[in-house]
Image (spheres, rainbow, N blue to C red):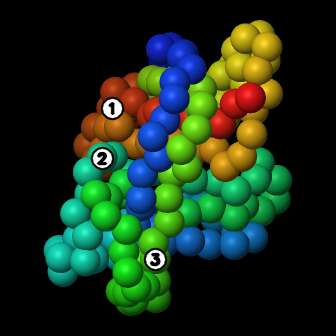
Amino acid sequence: MSHLDSQDVIDFPGTPTAVVRVTDYPVAEMPQFMDPAFTALGQAISAGVFVPVGPAFSRHEYVPTETASFEVGFPVTAALHDAVTFGDYEVVPSELPAGRIAIAKHHGGYDKLGDSWGAFMQWVEQQGLTAGLPFWEAYDTEPTPEMDPDELITGLAVPVS
């Protein structure tokens, strides 16, 4: 089961973030990037580098084709001052930008996220809005190996004008 709901347009205040960033990464290998990147972010949290104030997310600079440039991380109360390295990953400051955004909730496994993004972009267009960049996904439900993928909730967000 997979579906999209809770579409809305809001004024987003923006928030500083702590992230691991990657450029021109093969889309087919994204799952292999996510786990070690989030492990490094977890190590940064344990080391007191930052305190998350919301769910994990991924922010994309452009619509992925064969490759994607994106970052994964957490919203934080205050921006990091310096980059910090954990293993092979550098945790750096970034932000989710302030502005008018369209939001929605995807219910179900990550394999159906593309379908929900497609339906969401149609909804944005039907509202007479133009989607911008960057766009992001918030992983409202933390995935665990034993959970039912149908129970996952992923927030979708895109700047609009």
Decide: few, some or many residues near mark 2? Use Cα within 10 Å; few <14, some 14-19, many ≥20.
some
Quadrant showing the C terminus: top right
Task: Name the residue beneath numbered marker 1.
Answer: 148
Give the residue at x 35% y 37%. 140
Q: Which tag, 1 or 3, sits closer to the chain's start?
A: 3
Element under disc 3: strand
The percent position of residue 152, horizontal first and vertical second, equals 38, 32
Task: Name the residue beneath numbered marker 3.
Answer: 92
Give the residue at x 43% y 85%. 83
Q: Distance between the residues labelled 1 and 3?
A: 32 Å
- The reply to whether residue 50 is visible in this rendering is yes
Decide: few, some or many residues near mark 1? Use Cα within 10 Å; few <14, some 14-19, many ≥20.
few
Element under disc 2: loop
The percent position of residue 37, horizontal first and vertical second, equals 44, 71
Task: Name the residue beneath numbered marker 2.
Answer: 54
Q: At label 2, which amino acid type do we have?
A: Gly
- The reply to whether residue 111 is visible in this rendering is no
Q: At label 1, which amino acid type do we have?
A: Asp
Decide: few, some or many residues near mark 3? Use Cα within 10 Å; few <14, some 14-19, many ≥20.
some
Element under disc 1: loop
Q: Looking at the image, do the residues carrying marks 1 and 3 touch, with CB atoms under 8 Å apart?
A: no
Q: Looking at the image, do the residues carrying marks 2 and 1 touch, with CB atoms under 8 Å apart?
A: no
**Rendered position, 151 above or below 144:** above
Give the residue at x 77% y 62%. 67
Q: Nearer the viewer, residue 161 or 28?
A: 161
The percent position of residue 88, horizontal first and vertical second, equals 46, 88
Q: Which tag, 2 or 3, sits closer to the chain's start?
A: 2
Q: Which tag, 2 or 1, sits closer to the chain's start?
A: 2
**Rendered position, 115 above or below 14:** above
